[in-house]
Amino acid sequence: MAGSEAGTPSQADAEDSAHGARAPGGHAKSSFWVLLIGSIGVVYGDIGTSPLYALRESLKHVTGESGVLQRADVLGIVSLIFWALLIIVTLKYVLLLLRLDNKGEGGTVALMALAEKALGRRTPFIFILGIVGASLFYGDALITPAISVLSAVEGLKAVPGLGEWSETIVRDGASVTIEHAAPIAPFIVPISIGILITLFAWQSRGTGRMGALFGPITLVWFLTLGALGVWHITEDPTILAALSPHWGVQFLATHVGLGFIVLGAVFLAVTGAEALYADMGHFGRGPVRTAWLFIVLPCLTLNYLGQGAFVLRHPEALENLFFETAPGVMRLPLVILATMATIIASQAVITGAYSMTQQAIQLGFLPRMEIRRTSETQAGQIYMPQVNWLLLAGVLVLTLAFNSSERLAAAYGIAVTGEMMVTSMLAFVAIWKLWKAPPWLAVAVCLPFFLIENVFLASNLTKVWSGGFVPILLGVGLCLVMWTWTRGTRLLSDTVRRDEPLGKLFETLSLHPPHRVRGTAIFLTGDPEVAPAALMHNLKHNQVLHEQIIILTVRTLGAPRAPESERVRIEDFLPDVKRVIVSFGFMETPNVVKALTAARAMGLKFDIMKTSFFLSRRTIVPSEKSGMPLWQDHLFIYLARNATNATDFFHIPSGRAVELGTQVMV
């Protein structure tokens, strides 16, 4: 399959990413502080927008119809949010998972490859976890832009003159208060849709210029969060009591059923934590960890405490809690800053979706798709049109269907908790097998996280009929697609293996040699032991062989990038026939010509202008004895027909490529 690389603007070819020795985009020896600021923009954009809605949605469960907030309830919920940040994000992701890197890279797919390496083989259990984790990621990628942008634009309702307002008039000698709807309300969704369409339309131009501003803008956002928090904490310092777990435990003990439901909303505060691990290779373990411990976590904590202190004094402000904490004159600038922060959060998720898709393609989970490079100097800047427009369509459907961030909050969380549980299980395998820890110790480390995430998942599942079915259906659909593709390609590979062995073919040709023509012919094949279909068809129809033949196989390693020492392996099969295996990591873009050109130093001699690449284009037809149900056959055939052709995917010059068709039954 083809190679993959991460899709964020700050992606590096960093071999020493754990220490930030090489910068994003391949610029060596970048400053630690540059990487730290960059990580704040890309890694923490998603979790940084959670204060817009997390505490508000949590508190709404305890107000009831009366709208009354009890002090103990506010302290309890703020305490739960703080300890969720401390346990899930700090302990699991920052202190544990950042140490489980696959040669500097993180994320579900990298961890899956690491677990397979630790086990020494691909097991069905690890394979299923990889598919489930990858599928759930897309649920987050769809909902994050919609809920983030909507929640920011909804802040316009809190701007004086744009939001709800009331007036008191005298009628029949009595004072009457009349409530007026927010004049901006009908425009919230259209404005959000306009922002989202612009954001997705911009992707094809590359994210380099936008990426340069990510860090500084998000840093200003976090400092603003902290400043607002400190302001309201000084007005009611008793809110600091919420830092004690006592209040969270007491809330759950006194609100058994309700507390279980509230946990689903509390979890909104930690959505985006998975980006910590996924983006580790972009900036290095040190900058990501330092940014969290000394900037992001303190600012988030201060803001949640400040919101708690404010809502205790102004319970009527709960509907638009975050923006109400700012002075009236500062609300419009705050809305603009929040919108910029949510665009950055959405951008990180979108480019993360590109990265995940590339990795899934490389590992054989999905068919090939078009990948465009948007930068000549930074390897991570890519654009995938199919993924981009499918994401936009899904985001717009969600925005129009749910119509508000409050309703979307019900759909949020299930996909993220599921993905977190997958990482906990994969981490157990890595700690046990890779770190050689005793099984009981690996269980002791991972089981508490797994159980907590189980509780969060169960709580989020109570919102299935309120919108939680969206990520579930999406995840099931994507799992079905990935399962069908992997199963179909395996059956297709088994069919190909029944073809004539390469050695037997040339043994026959030595007895009845065909006409030889000048030049080099390179035949691409997935199995170097079997005669490529393109070679067989060339012999059948053209009845010639080139004077030099290269049987080329592209393979994927279980590492992010292939070491240069393992990039090309050359075997002299016959005096005029060579078998060449080119290896790429699962985060690399395969460029066959570039790899072969570099292999000249190893004795591989060929002139690109006198070389033809022969590829087989298979037409797949369903068979009743394929091993898959007929509906799955048709799904696999549809995916195969819409896959990007190998010429483009492997960066083979179209003028040097020859495709020969063949029909295969599966």
Image (cartoon, grey):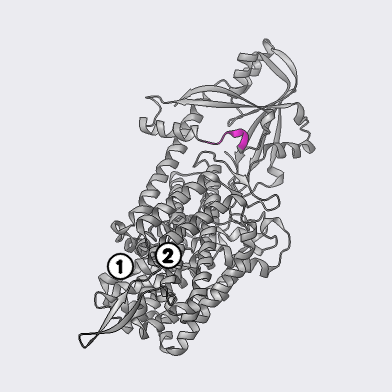
Say the numbered circle drawn on residue 261: 1
Q: Which span of residues is magenta-colored?
A: 643-648
Q: Looking at numbered disc 1 in the image, what kind of residue is underneath it?
A: Ile
Which label number is shown at residue 449?
A: 2
Farthest residue to the left: give it.
172
- Where 89 falls versus 657 (above or below)? below
Question: Circle 2 sits in a helix, a strand or a loop, which is it?
Answer: helix
Q: Nearer the viewer, residue 603 or 445?
A: 603
1 or 2: mark nearer the eye: 1
**Residue beneath the point at 53% across and 70% down:** 337
Q: Nearer the viewer, residue 220 or 499?
A: 220
Q: Dot 1: what SS?
A: helix
Query: Residue 338 at what x, y percent from top left?
Result: 50, 69
What amino acid type is highlighted by mark number 2? Phe
Quadrant housing the C terminus: top left
Q: Residue 150: horizontal and vertical position, in percent?
A: 43, 63
The spot of residue 206 in percent (x, y) is: 62, 53
Residue 646 counted in the magenta span:
yes
Residue 119 x %, y %:
51, 49
